[in-house]
Image (cartoon, grey):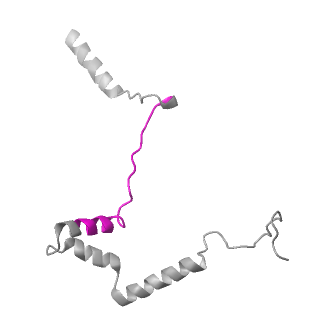
Amino acid sequence: MPFVKGMQKVDGSGRKKGQTNRRNLEVVCKFEEICEKYGDPLEAMAEMAFDMNNDQNLRFQAMKEVSQYGYAKRRQMEITGANGEPLEVRLQLIDQITNAIEKLGKG
């Protein structure tokens, strides 16, 4: 019986979560074929990045690409206090030292 809009999905039907679709699988297979034939592109970019005979701009671009595989991209994060108010930081140790110095000066 074909699916008609409004019908409930049958349990266990459809593609399972995390399963790659046919097109993505074809792309991965093609990429693996290219890597077997021509070599690993990441390795080639790393060689370009560290080859002093290459133009500095090319080396820089290659290094940027290669570094993305080794380091996560960082995102700016704003830290605020309660209800978005400015964050209040209190350094108690400094207060304790300051109080101790004041006591020594008075004594």
Q: Residue at x 35, y 64 (%)?
A: 68
Examine the rendered structure and indicate whether residue 105 appears above or below residue 29: above
Examine the rendered structure and indicate whether residue 102 appears above or below residue 13: above
Residue 107 in view (yes/no): no
Of residues 69 and 1, the one nearer the viewer is 1
Most common secondary structure along the magenta stretch: loop
Examine the rendered structure and indicate whether residue 107 appears above or below residue 2: above
Quadrant in the picture for residue 106: top left
Q: Residue at x 29, y 18 (%)?
A: 99
Instruction: Classify residue 7 as left or right of residue 75.
Output: right
Instruction: Inspect the magenta stretch and tell me whether residue 54 lies in it.
Output: no
Residue furthest to the left: 53
Quadrant in the picture for residue 104: top left
Q: Give residue 29's position: percent from left, percent from top.
A: 49, 84
Residue furthest to the front: 5
Q: Residue at x 24, y 14 (%)?
A: 102
Per the rendered image, the range of residues in magenta is 60-82
